[in-house]
Image: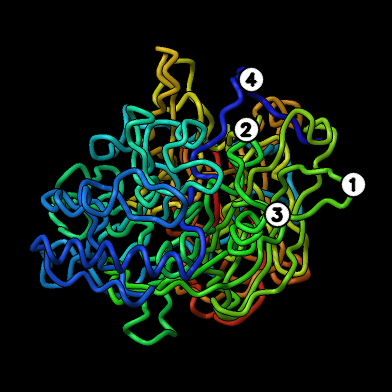
Amino acid sequence: MFSVKFQLRETKHVAILMNRKLVMYKKLVMYKSVLTLAAIALVAAGCGDLGVSHPENASLKVANGRAATPGKQAGKSENDVAGQCSDPGYEEHGSAEQVDQSTVHVGPAAIDTYDPALHLFVDDYHIRNLLSMKRVFGKAKKDPGPALTDIPGRRICWGSVLTEQGKHRLWYVSIVPLNCHELATAGVWGRGDEYGFFPERHPGAVPEWKTTVLSYAESDDGITWSRPDNLGLVEWQGSKANNILMDGSVAMQQYDGALTDMDCPSVVRDDAAPAAERYKLIAHWGTLHSFDNRASGLGRSDEDMQRFWNASAKYVMTSPDGIHWPGPLRRLKECAGGGDYSGVTRDHRNNRWWYNDRARQGLWRGAYMRTAGLCTSKTLEDWPEHVEQVFPLGVAEDFGAQYEHHGMVPFNYGDQDLGFLELSVEGLPKASLLVSHHDGERWRRVDDCPPVIECGPDGAYDSMIVNATRNAPLLVGDEMVIVYNGHRELPDDSGTKEGYMFTARLRRDGFAGMAVDLQATARHGRPAMLQTQPVTVTSETLALNIEGHGGTARVALCDEGAVPIDGFGLEDCLPIDEDNVRAEVGWQNADIRQLTGRRVMVLVELSDGVIWSFHL
């Protein structure tokens, strides 16, 4: 029986900013005509060629952060805008020559956690027999304080990490601290048929294409992260000296204001793609108006609302280096479960991709509960229409009334798949649970495993939300590093949130292990033993991830009938390291290479300690 072994604090309902980020623009003909007028006025004022004739050209510049938008009113007239060219808020994205190339690390992608010779003990899949042993779980230890803070006026949200040539590269969504639904309700982007930017209506007003942006950071060790604040690509608060890669301007122009912001992005490396499209950004794109019209009574027309909803979907963008994202967006798939969740990770073992989305329940009319759904594809362009719901919302979740499944992050680890299942309360992910999968079987939750990561105590930097980045843990020396996003709400009743990146560490392979039950060994009067299911010898050595055995561990190899193989008996085993994530096992007069390609069982005898994995 699955049990949640932590207490989730009651929280106020918070509509997360990233659901959909606000809109504008009425109709294509009005859009083109008004932007053209604005361009003419700006050119007359000496601001140069603005390139507004093509929706795919994201080089429009509008002074003081005000976009001339279609509708019956605008926050400023074209003449007002034309006289304020010194502080562009809708600017041209920088070229490659503008970027300090020392910050760009492009090289082979690491596949550290996929290893078909590595076998874990998170479940009984590799266990044939046990004597006086029990499963124990590793506990990730959070590093103190945030590993990465955002630039002033923004906070960190969803992210993904790639490791290339020893460099860890992080892409994350950066969002504004205030709740964007509050800004929409205030009319910052207009009401009814009025579309535009009206900063005087709220002190925290920002243009809608700036509410969510894609930003970048790097690390050499997975623990200490830094922002390259010299990319020169996107303006924020009057300067391009920041780490922002892209805002919503390309999407806004391409889809005439029906798309302005991204949610739950994943950046992946596609080595099968041409070099110019090596990196791909997959995300949900939408606009907050499609939500806020209903929630806040903005009075948008049915025609506009239908256009907004029709545009909301999952899209892909490409980049040659992960830094420059020129567009355009390409539509990938519909929102399988009707939500704005999205996540893509690589299934290296099966040479395919996972897509995590929400699954529809279909239980009763109007029912909506968050669930984790998966589908797969050999390419990043051709996805099934529907997703498989991975887990039911059962008794432990009170059938969705207490907890929901916000989503999941699947990844290869060893010869199997693991994942972080996000448990949410009132739409906010509060913990990540360990889940497991083997080929030919269904995904399952790891029984009795405590959360891998969970919200911190009240007041902590991660007290409101926690969710892991869209990737496997980083392997750094003898440890795994889990990079995760955490949020807190300031205690001043302002509704302001802060978001950061954090790191947590645990022993390599140390999700779960088999530990000696000392009470059982005392009762039975003999050492503990673990016998594995048969595995094929593919490595030149047998290595155990083992600790605390006090010099008592011995290992034998048996054939598929459990008969000891000559020369590989317990009495032939050489001493084994006391604590090592890859303690090599040897025998006096035998070499494991003699058995390459054979199916063997591994038999471990020990009087104390924990075995976390074996590599053969």
Q: Which residue is mark 2?
A: 450
The mark found on residue 211 in the picture is none
Residue 211 percent coordinates (x, y): 39, 45
For the rendered model, the colour scheme is rainbow
Q: Could you tell me which residue is drawn at 80 percent across and 41 percent down?
A: 393
Q: Is tag 4's residue or tag 1's residue first in the polypeptide sequence?
A: 4
Residue 372 percent coordinates (x, y): 69, 51
Q: Nearer the viewer, mark 1 or mark 2?
A: 1
Q: Which residue is mark 4?
A: 7
From mark 2 to mark 4, how far is it between C-alphas? 12 Å
From mark 3 to mark 1, how far is it between C-alphas? 14 Å
From mark 3 to mark 4, how far is it between C-alphas? 29 Å
Residue 490 percent coordinates (x, y): 40, 19
Q: Nearer the viewer, mark 3 or mark 4?
A: 3
Q: Nearer the viewer, mark 2 or mark 4?
A: 4
**Residue positioned most to the left:** 46
Q: Is tag 3's residue or tag 4's residue first in the polypeptide sequence?
A: 4
Q: Which residue is mark 1?
A: 365
Q: Which residue is mark 3?
A: 338
Q: Amino acid at mark 4?
A: Gln
**Disc 1: CA contacts within 10 A as few (<14), some (14-19) or many (>=20):** few
Q: Secondary structure at mark 3?
A: loop
Q: Could you tell me which residue is drawn at 85 percent across and 33 percent down?
A: 395
